[in-house]
Image (cartoon, helix red, strand yellow):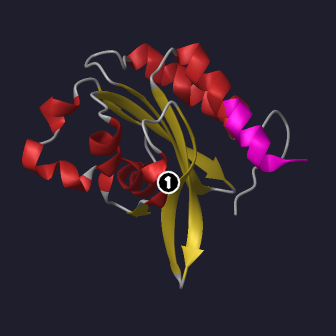
Amino acid sequence: MNTNKDYQVQIEKIREALHCDIIALALVESAENMHVLKWQYTSGTISERIKKVVLQSGKGIAGGVFKNGKPLLMADVEEFTVKNDLFNYPILKLEKILSIGATPLWHSGRVVGVLLAGFREPHLMTPERLDMLISMSKSDIGTLDGKELMWS
């Protein structure tokens, strides 16, 4: 099984179903007794720079979803962030995202990743689209259609 290809195919299917501009999958990596997240799989990004960003638990979009273990909906990013604070949200700034939804990925009772879908226009991420993202993350990414969830 080629897990890298499987993840990429699944996020592209989800992006197409949601009609979103960007989708990104951050997975946990162990780093000297700490856990960090990295955007390892993306579709619709402006640049590959986002894959170099190291995310800390509790910081930024993915870090907050990872730490809290709960989905996040920001219909209009500018209502939730101060322009001067955007450096704390690198994916928003680098990818020019204005509307976002993110959900945790669970394995054996622990959050092991975050799936994010975003739009470059405000108010396009709706509660219905977030519900679709959550549902698809469980059926497509969480199990990879029956295959065991794997991460680096």
Q: Is residue 142 left or right of residue 104?
A: right
**Which image quarter: residue 140?**
top right
The residue sitting at 28% across, 23% down in the picture is 75
Q: Position of residue 14 (x, y in %)?
A: 61, 24
Classify 81 as above or below 101. below
Classify 137 as above or below 84. above
Q: Position of residue 81 (x, y in %)?
A: 15, 41
Q: Start and end of the magenta stretch?
A: 1-10
Classify 28 as above or below 99. below
The residue sitting at 41% across, 48% down in the picture is 65
| Front residue of this view, candidates 133 and 120 | 120
| Front residue of this view, candidates 106 and 47 | 47
Q: Does 43 lie within the magenta span?
A: no
Kind of residue sitting beneath label 1? Lys
Q: Position of residue 49 (x, y in %)?
A: 43, 52
Q: How many marks?
A: 1
Q: Position of residue 118 (x, y in %)?
A: 40, 29
The residue sitting at 73% across, 32% down in the picture is 9
Image quadrant occupied by the C terminus: bottom right
Looking at the image, can residue 126 be seen? yes
Residue position for label 1: 51
Q: Is residue 61 left or right of residue 38?
A: left
Query: Overall secondary structure of the magenta stretch?
Result: helix
Looking at the image, can residue 143 be seen? no
